[in-house]
Amino acid sequence: MPSALENSSLPDPRFADIARESSVALAQLLRSHPEQDRAHVRMDGADLVLPRQAIELLRNILNEMAQGNGVTILPVHAELTTQEAANLLNVSRPHLIKLLEAGELPFSKVGTHRRITLQDLMAYKAGRDAESEAAMQELVDQAQELDMGY
């Protein structure tokens, strides 16, 4: 059975403008009604009640579609294969396995196969991104201190 990551595709460019307009409209509604915890939606004669979190997620999805990006939704507790995790980190699978074996990223085993939860992967990625940002800021500070004109 193919995973959600393998089924992702780019949105049809013809719908980018619709997605952009809808994203802007949803963002304005969310800003103008910060106390609302649900939204009423009418579609084809059916009335739906959606939680605010779903509307915020929809706004984010539409924003990505407006930029021509494909979107994949996974539950936070989803377990990823090593290849899926490597793809999300934009690293090779052998490099990811080294990270797992070094204990830098928690994993479990299903038989002989390693699995990484999306939540753990995103926490690792956030830490890695924060370290990169700190290193970049240090370089900027040094360049300014040395009056390098950057």
Image (cartoon, helix red, strand yellow):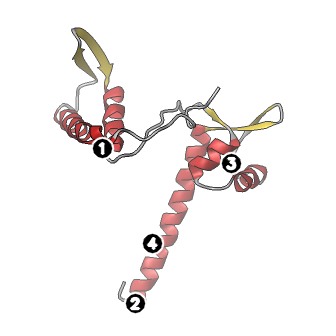
Q: Position of residue 137 (x, y in %)?
A: 45, 72
Residue at which label 4 appears = 137
The quarter of the image holding the N terminus is: top right
**How far separated are the C-alphas under marks 2 and 4?**
15 Å
Q: Position of residue 145 (x, y in %)?
A: 41, 87
Q: Which mark is residue 148?
A: 2
Quarter location, residue 20? top left
**In screen coordinates, is 18 left or right of 92?**
left
**Sequence order check: which comes first, mark 1 or mark 4?**
1
Residue at which label 1 appears = 66
SS label for mark 1: helix
**In screen coordinates, is 89 left or right of 148?**
right
The residue mark sitting in front, 1 or 2, is 1
* Type of amino acid under label 2: Met
**How far separated are the C-alphas under marks 3 and 4?**
25 Å
**Sequence order check: which comes first, mark 1 or mark 2?**
1
The residue mark sitting in front, 1 or 4, is 1
* Type of amino acid under label 3: Leu
Q: Position of residue 136 (x, y in %)?
A: 48, 71
Residue at which label 3 appears = 105
The residue mark sitting in front, 3 or 1, is 1
Residue 127's place in the image compared with 84, above or below, is below
**How far separated are the C-alphas under marks 2 and 3?**
38 Å
**Residue lying at 52% horizontally and 32% vertically, measured from the top left:** 74
